Amino acid sequence: MSKKANTSLIMSDAASRQQRISSLLGQAILFLITSLSTITVFFIFYFILKDAIPFFKSEGFKEFFTTTRWYPSGSPAEFGALPIFVGTGLVTLGAIVVAVPLGIAASVCLSDLLPFNVRQIVKPVIEILAAIPSVAYGFFALVVFAPLLQNHGGAILSTGVWIVLGPIFALLTMVLGDLLLDKLRNTMSPKVATSIVFPILGTLSFLFLYRLSANLSGVEISSGTNALNVSIILGIMALPTVVSVAEDALQAAGRELREGSYALGATRAETIIKTIIPASVSGILAAVILGVMRAIGETMVVWMASGNAARIPEPWYNMLQPVRTLTATIAGDMGEADHVTGSSRFHVLFAMAFCLLAFSFIMNLISEIIVKRSRKKLGK
Amino acid sequence: MRLETRKLLDKAFSGLGLISIAVMAIALLLILTPIVWRGSKAFIFKGTIEHRRVMLELFDRGNPEKFNQESADAAAARAPVYQMMEAFEAEMKAMDRKKRKEYKAPFREVENALEELLGPMPGQRTPVLLRQRYGQTRWDRALVKLHETLYSEEWDYSNADAMGVLVEKPRVDFFTGTELEPLFQYLEDYLPEMMQPKTTFYYQFITDKSKDSHIFGGIWPEVLGTIYLTIGAMIFAIPMGVIAAIYLCEYAKEGRIISFIRICISTLAGVPSIVFGLFGLAFFLNTIQVSDSKSVLAGSLTLSLLILPTIIRSSEEAILAVPRAYKEASLGLGASRWHTVLTVILPAAMPGILTGIVISMGRAAGETAPIIFTAAVSVGAPLKIWETLSQPTPALPWNIYNLCTEHEAVDEIRHVQYGMVFTLVAIVLLLNLAAILMRARISKKLRG
Amino acid sequence: MSEEITMKKIDTFAEHGDGNQPHETHLSIRDFSLFYGDFEAVRKVNMDIPKKMVTAMIGPSGCGKSTLLRSINRMNDLIPSTSAAGEINFEGHNIYARNIDVVTLRARVGMVFQKPNVFPKSIFDNVAYGPRLQGMRNKQELSEIVEQSLRQAAIWDEVKDRLQANALGMSGGQQQRLCIARALAIKPEILLMDEPTSALDPKATALIEDLIGELRQNYTIVIVTHNMQQAARVSDLTAFMYEGVLVEFGKTKQLFTNPANPQTENYITGRFG
């Protein structure tokens, strides 16, 4: 037997104490390093709030949140940030309209429709979309997309209508037609009904789309750097987040659920829409929230391509006018405010940052809670 | 619903899904194509004699003898232009005063356009600005300038109701019958001889310093700044992130404190990047003053906090993916916990951890908002390594923004902007490609 | 034919076990219980494991036999919310006492797991892992100990030419024998085996069983198995556990041929489990 056979199992008290202390000490150091993120979060809140409070103290809340005149360098300075909040909301809303339907459809596709090897190709596409730096998106929006919108706005809008609404209307026609056929079953033969109902519905929806796109193709866009431009680009940027989180949620719904539905004779579409999506709705909601956070926190794209006009579009939903967002205001005004640290002009930017921070913190908490609850429900 | 309709709807549903995937792929393609196509033109383009002059005089690069030969050819081709101009000046002197006045301004315009196209006239004093000392270095820009020389732009306000319309008028019409008339035809016919365009592979675009705020030269200060910032961020973030992940996976007992730390990590991941920038300014620069002004150090610290959650999460995932059996085997052989982590768990998790690190490197390299207030300046020389502790630096993401919004000659340097975007996107995508390949290898290994 | 071999083996081992010389107790388990949270997985087990013999533990799955085995080198410490009561005495010390050095304990009580768990390192590094832990750095000594362990584990001839190859490239049976060699390299006194053949094919299983027969001359072996024939083939003593309770513990031949407890009889004759 080697020498270690003699090593006693029993440690002397001193050795035991020493070992316990050193292990405790080691763990304490590890714990400290781990809690660095926690400390950072606290520091971020503290330092942003510390520089935001002077603004609220001297200017109050009412002007900042409810009035529309934003002249921080005027005399007297005016800090009506409502247009900026509206701009942020408008752009985020637009991004969600782009990202959520696309993202959910794509995640369903990834989790349920595509075979394994095709998925292996599609996944990198999503990863690349997520990896492209935001300044590159901004550059694209400003240098490529904005001139296109400005010069061929009408054509782009009407093509967009066909691409987006075309498939949806085709689906609608099919569903409505089928419902009508059910109603008409007693009054005429199915063949006749089919040959009447579908052409009529098809023509109607085609006419509607045609009128809409014809109207839109006449639209002139005076500036390519506007809310629409930014919304589309932000939507594309938020897509990868939405897709990957929603896909995780759909996967988590599990095989058993799917098999249960298929075994009852449901088609794939019915299984997904009636069983899988309701089962994973909380995960999908979390995906949407994370997408919102991605869009609202983005700086470079909106700074470069939103037009940076601090006024509420007229009417407020007019996406073709330039807008300004919180992030872009912070990025753009800090350079000038920097030199007069201590002025309201400096602190107002921290007040905006605090609004962003608080919003993203709350959103984050909500999504955590949603995910946790859904996990409990699924018993995992 | 009838069965056929249900089946049809099922197909339509699949179709919608596929369309969404296709839309995503097309969006990616639409965004990347102009960046790659026009970006590569910063590296491969038709360079004129002026480009080679710049290379020789500013960067000491190229074959002087060959250049002199070409330069002589170009000068010979240009000589008639200058002769015609001299002849016209002589003609102008002979005109009566009123007519001379009429011709003076348009002639001045032609002269200016020609100087921009070909560089300073022979015999002229060397101009102050570097950009005025050389003609157009790129053939595509030379063609644009030729067009400006040949046509004058005027606004037509004849329709009082509509906005003014831009009209281009051939300048030659104005000078018909004078000594200058043949100049325009000559320029159009002999531009290649005057500029000597040649396909040029300017790979030094990445490693050359910029001259006269990016009118000439390359983007080295920006590339170097991005490298510094990225590496700096990794130096702080990797040890912190990996150690935190080890603690969370191997040591921590799940409880209130740990779940609180986890919430904080996900909160940190959700903080908008511009807020990180403000925090970096308020904390690193204004409070603890890691440096007197913006600096690479402050920027790196800010970026490292930004990527910390990503590194923690991916490392945690990689560590959790290490089979429990390895850990048990090592402990069963009498290894201590820490020893087990170092010799068994970390090596086995390393590819996964590296994947996460590489992806967050790409993130750090491409982030702009956090470095605006902490590290980035528009113009600057490449830094020495010790200067990173106290000096700000140009960086690719910031300078892309700066060049395409605030530069005085935005349109003249589109190729530099595209070149920068292309370089940045290439760096980031190569890092991600490396990560994708690593992951593929890992999953292959795990599947056996 | 396999039946014949089996019977022969039982006979030889049983003969050995029937020998009249009294065996020294190596491990004595006294009123030992182990809890997962509130669930008592092992209930007040009392048992003396003799030196240099093979003790098998059998019982239906979930009966606590693996848990008991893992308690012997305190592997259960790794699972959160476990707690132990009672004593396991090793060399007169209760290994659950506060001042026990768990790391040394594990170095002296080797373990082989259900699934072969080789490290993704070379064969040599796998075997040398334990000795290196104990501070052995001398190349010469290391390679001697590696060779010796691999020979003991009856795998030396198969791997001697590719010691630097990655261990993951070996077959399952080879991997398991490598795990045994790795456990032997730290010169343990007790070798715990947790269903070591359950992931292997019959041929590899036979090799491991032969190996156990060899090793019993130098080591105290405790083996958990699902396979009663295996227990009958390789062990001197057998313990039958059911729902955390040690139902019967005795000489293998006796337990299989003439069990004292009706529950044991039901199990070994295949009425449940």
Image (cartoon, coloured by chain):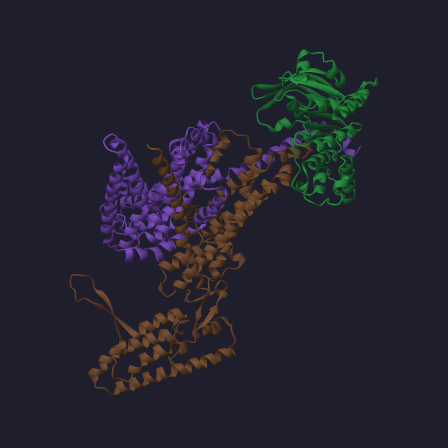
Chain in brown, by letter, is B
Q: Is residue C264 left or right of residue A81?
A: right
In the image, is residue A62 above or below residue B153?
above
B210 or A178: which is nearer to us? A178
Chain in green, by letter, is C
Q: Which quarter of the picture shows residue B238? A: top right
Count of numbered labels shown in the rendering: 0
Q: Position of residue A274 (x, y in %)?
A: 38, 31
Residue furthest out toward the bottom: B94
Q: Is residue B143 left or right of residue B352?
A: left
C164 or A275: which is nearer to us? A275
Work out whether residue B402 can be spotted: yes
In the image, is residue B226 above or below residue C134?
below
Q: Position of residue C253 (x, y in %)?
A: 76, 18
Q: Position of residue B193 (x, y in %)?
A: 41, 78
**Residue at 37% across / 62% down in the picture?**
B407
C178 or B91: which is nearer to us? C178
In the image, is residue A141 above or below residue C144?
below
Q: Is residue B166 left or right of residue C25?
A: left
Q: Position of residue B234 (x, y in %)?
A: 53, 48
Residue furthest out toward the left: B160
Chain A shade: purple
Work out whether residue B208 can be spotted: no
Q: Which quarter of the picture shows residue A8? A: top right
State the quadrant of the N terminus of chain B: top left
Q: Which quarter of the picture shows residue C169? A: top right
A336 or C219: which is nearer to us? C219
State the quadrant of the C terminus of chain B: top right
